[in-house]
Image (cartoon, rainbow, N blue to C red):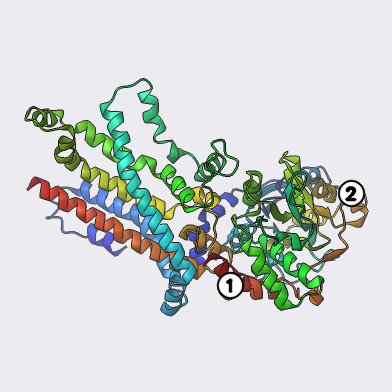
Amino acid sequence: MASNAAVLERPAGVVSGRAGGTVAKGMAMGYLSVVVLLPLAALIWGSRADGLDSFWHQATRPEALAALKLTLGVAAVCALVNAVTGTAIAWVLVRDRFPGKGTVDAVIDLPFALPTIVAGLTLLALYGPGGPFGVDVAFTRLGLLLALLFVTLPFVVRAVQPVLLELDTEMEEAASSLGAGSIAIFRRIVFPNLLPAILSGVALAFARAVGEFGAVVLISGNIPFKTEVSSVYIFGQLQSGNGTGAAAVSVVLLAISLGVLLLIGAFRRWRTKHDYA
Amino acid sequence: MRVIWIAFLGVAVLAGSAAGASKGGSIDLVAYSTPKDAYGKIISSFQKTQAGNGVDFSQSYGASGDQARAVAAGQDADLVALSLDPDVSLLVGKGLVPKKWNSNSHRGIVSDSVVVFVVRDGNPKKIRGWGDLVRSGVQVITPNPFTSGGARWNVMAAYGAQRRAGKTDKQAIAYLYRLFKHVPVQPDSARAALQIFAQGKGDVLLTYENEAIYAEKKGVHTEYRTPKATLLIETPVALTKSGLSKPAAKAFYKYLWSSTAQKAFADQGYRPVVKSVSKGYHFFRPPGLFTIGSAKYGLTGWTKVNKRFFHPEKGIMAKIERSVGQ
């Protein structure tokens, strides 16, 4: 809460007559503290309740590390697939005309509305043993990826769509009249403009995939070292009364996610600056 | 640590705190999820009795371990109905349930069940005994004993059955290693395991008899076999200290062993614990039935068994999980 106080105590001269702004900042920081920062701080505090040695021991147990590796790996693949498919879907929704487009556009957000456990159940029924298509990927890493792709679908689409809508087609027309092929136009004009949006979508999809529980708990098989992801491992530790272990692994997961998000953010800013320089 | 529980279980706590006041008093019932229908019926018939007239109930159902931890973190509870003894012990440790909670004539046990094998229609793989589970080509579905407290009954049934057949402790543990090599999926709960089995995965589902009966009622194409040697599942109910100060809660607690309440449990597939009621139902009593307290088979009560088998790091099951995964 120290940062909160610092904002409020800023000398009046600096914010010259913008008391409204100060109040807004104070409220934003207060809200953030209550909703996000405080719970995260409590989590970190809890993870070191038994000392740093125990924290390290809990976070580096072979099961925990295996789950962590699997989680980060699948989340990364999921984010990359989203980068391609999400951009393609956004492109089709903005640039193409076809009957039922409005409905498709509305359907994109549904994975957010569906309780994720229901998503897991549905995927299991469709792509599990006895599914109607004869495809059985349940209880494998592929099934895990499928569940994560389902719940993270909207992120890249919704990040890219507005940018694509705003994008002036004149640039593309100019390039075309100068003899550039469609691949060159996409690579040199459209893609650089979309990249920041794609990256922010990818970052969101990655973060969500790392933390997802409901959609994967049914379809992943939960075999340690094979198909057990961190969220399910953490759940198991909690159920077995090992709260410190659960908190320790959560903290590591959060730290790595934060690192990845910061990296993507930095790269995005660098690209944006670089383009306009 | 308390802060963490509250952070993790905030939702559960909020869900349970919406109780209303009324003239007959109110009872907060915190229970595990499967007996929900039975409790619904028992509560409405209790409210028709003199003692239950005008008594309001606030009911919360969820995974047994989650419910116990929510109560430990401050959720209001007068009566807790959990799936196994250690979840009640957690509350005893927190000073929320008196140490003598299991001192009534039924030792605080309100219903029984047994560990059974659910198999495909017609039992194509001819699963009859524990030995059949580890035959080559047989896939067994059982929940992960670390995410599902109830799955621990299955593990101890497997172990105890080996001991009853004259195997040594070492041999029985070796059997568990072999058994878990046949488990391709470890769902997070008994209900999820049933779901996955119904979906077509696996040849045998290890579960409780009441779940098997539930599956039959729901029209899942399965049948179940009760092995000759199996474990008696005992589900406890306890009054908390706050419940002990409420006459209505005490009356309801007693009512759970009335014939009306016991019949309601039996109708949902649980074995009644009151003899006069169980006579009316035909639950097969396997010749080799043992309990978690059958010391001659190495079963020395949940406290010791939990520590030896289910310690999240040093437990025998933790080692088995490590060996099958790697």
Image position of B293 (left or right of A142): right
The circle drawn on residue B255 is none
Report the chain holding disc 2: B
Give me the residue at 77% from left, 75% from top. Answer: B167
- Pick out the residue farthest to the top: A99
Hey, what amino acid is under mark 2? Tyr
- Name the chain letter of the residue that bears numbered label 1: B
Where B93 sits versus A78, above or below?
below
Towards the viewer: A29 or B153: B153
Gap between marks 2 and 1 measured at Cα: 41 Å
In this view, the residue in front, B52 or A176, is A176
Residue in the image at 85% along x and 57% along y: B273
**B217 sits left or right of A82 in the view:** right
Residue B250 is situated, as x and y percent measured from the top left of the image, at: 78, 58
The foreground one among B274 and B27 is B274
Quarter of the image with the N terminus of chain A in it? bottom left
Tell me which amino acid carries mark 1: Lys
Residue B187 at x, y percent in the picture: 59, 54
Q: Are marks 2 and 1 on the same chain?
A: yes
Q: Secondary structure at mark 2?
A: loop
- Up-down: is B309 above or below B83? below
Q: Is residue B245 visible?
A: no
Examine the rendering and report whether any part of residue A21 can be seen.
yes
Is there CB contact under 8 Å for labels 2 and 1? Answer: no
Q: Report the mark closest to the observer, 2 or 1.
A: 1
Q: Which residue is mark 2?
A: B281
Of all residues, the one furthest to the front in this rendering is B136
SS for dot 1: helix
Choose top left, top right, bottom left or bottom right for residue B310.
Answer: bottom right
B315 to the left or right of A224: right
> What residue is shown with label 1?
B319
Residue B166 image offset from top left, x and y in percent: 81, 74
